[in-house]
Image: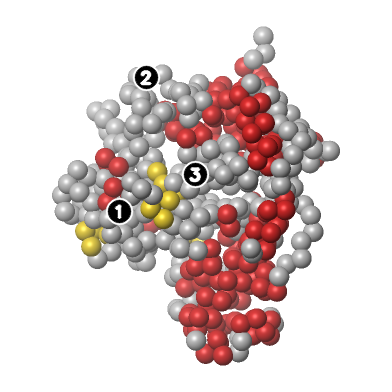
Amino acid sequence: MNALGIRLASGFRGWGLALALATLLAACGGGGDASAPPSGGGATTLSAAATLGQKIFADTALSASGRQSCASCHVASAAFAEDASASGVDHGLPVALGGPGMDLAGFRNTPSLMYTALTPAFFFDSDGSPNGGFFRDGRAATLADQATMPFTSSFEMANADAAEVIARLKTRPYLAEFVALYGDAVLADPRTALARVGSALAAFESEEPSFDPFSSKFDAVQRGQAQLTAQELRGMGLFNNATKGNCSACHPSTSADGSTPPMFTDYSYDNLGIPRNPLIPGNTSAAPAYTPANGSDGVQTYYDLGVCGPFREETANLAASCGQFKVPTLRNVAVTAPYFHNGRFATLKEAIGFYVRRDTDPQEWYPTAADGSVTKFDDLPASYGGQFVVKAGVVGSDAGYLGNVNTAEIPYNRSIGDTPALSPDEIDDVITFLCTLTDGYDPARPSAQVLPAQCLAAARTTAAANTP
């Protein structure tokens, strides 16, 4: 068992019983149980590999610009997602900047690295649907693979190849630690050496407690150390209700195996028809030259189709999954705005509003013509017809990619004019529950946790609505 497994196993003793009791209590509107998963606050001695990985994670000198590290885009105070303002330069984009001059925009919103080490490797289930893997499209098989890819991405750390990364590594003060762990000979093989860099980063992200603390109010409730407010309980009920929010269909609020706390993701993939985000430079008519020109439907020159490209190269037999992206954990979701793969929504209120009104009020989200017609799912090719190309091979079917959008599950199974699955007040209730998934809650000093403004606004708005 690796260091992560030992640490988690020691902390999860009794969690299965706690989970069972908590589930029963939740069904009755109750609280939790006294058995405890890990708090994440205890001291942990990192292995030599993890200690090295910690130094690499924060080192900007391994980038072509000399100004970007893993920590630049994965900020601890933002649940290891991006916080542009933390660097003192808020670029106002839903994607990170990188490249040799730190002025090249990426294509996807930076995901949180918290709890990423618990992600299963990419696999296909019995019906051929993708699951697990790393990045939003699952293109990295392991956490170590994921950690190495930004080093040679032209719009991220922008090294030309593995050899350039290792040339920079040879100048770093921790080189002796690297050689002590992996041997001097590996430096002559840049690709293997870069893989060892990835191994060290994966060790750090797996062993450092701040990546998986399980220290939210929700976790405290499960341990019997706190109670949800009436509004948070309503929100949890709506979250789990299969006829209302139905959020738990993809973001389960119960443990998958009875031995670990719920991860609030089932690691599946889904196509929600997220609206195109014009704030991403690659989505505009003035797209930068490094934008993948993979669209030839006469509407856009670039589409992000997630699992089937353009950044994932292995796209064979994935036509039915075009436009799908990995379901993220909702732990710490209140501090990781903007939301979805393209950062289209700035707040939870907007994101949940889209979920429940996408099909009842599509004009809120999609382009509307002068005649009132709405172009739904505008970030997918409107048709296939053999014209859309991903990488070197044609993918898809004559049915088109619009048919891949999830329109059958609640809350999407509605039409224009229908009543949305959640009212505005109910959306606020769900938000307050989601805010209980924010790590850093101290049951002994609950008021010490400062939640984001959107959490406080949701609580105040509903309180005002319920005032006689």
**How dense is the environment of label 3, judged by Cα within 10 Å: few (below 14), some, or many (20 and up)?**
many
Circle 2/circle 1 CB separation < 8 Å: no
The quadrant in which the C terminus is found is top right
Question: Dot 1 corresponds to which residue?
Answer: 318
**Marked residue nearer the N-terminal end (3 or 2):** 3
Q: Amino acid at mark 1?
A: Leu
Front-most of 257 and 194?
257
The quadrant in which the N terminus is found is bottom right
Residue 164's spot in the image, x, y percent?
50, 82
Residue 112's spot in the image, x, y percent?
57, 53
Residue 1's label in the rendered image is none
Q: Secondary structure at mark 2?
A: loop
Residue 266's label in the rendered image is 3
Q: How many marks?
A: 3
Q: Quadrant of residue 367?
A: top left
Q: Furthest-top residue in view?
A: 468
Front-most of 130 and 93?
130
Q: Is residue 298 above or below residue 219?
A: below
Front-most of 27 and 362?
27
Q: Is 11 situated left or right of 333 in this image?
A: right
Question: Dot 2 corresponds to which residue?
Answer: 418
Q: Quadrant of residue 76?
A: bottom right
Question: Disc 3 versus disc 1: distance between alpha carbons?
Answer: 19 Å
Q: Nearer the viewer, mark 3 or mark 2?
A: 3
Res. 42 visible in picture: yes
Residue 423's spot in the image, x, y percent?
50, 21
Q: Amino acid at mark 3?
A: Asp
Q: Is 383 situated left or right of 441 in this image?
A: left
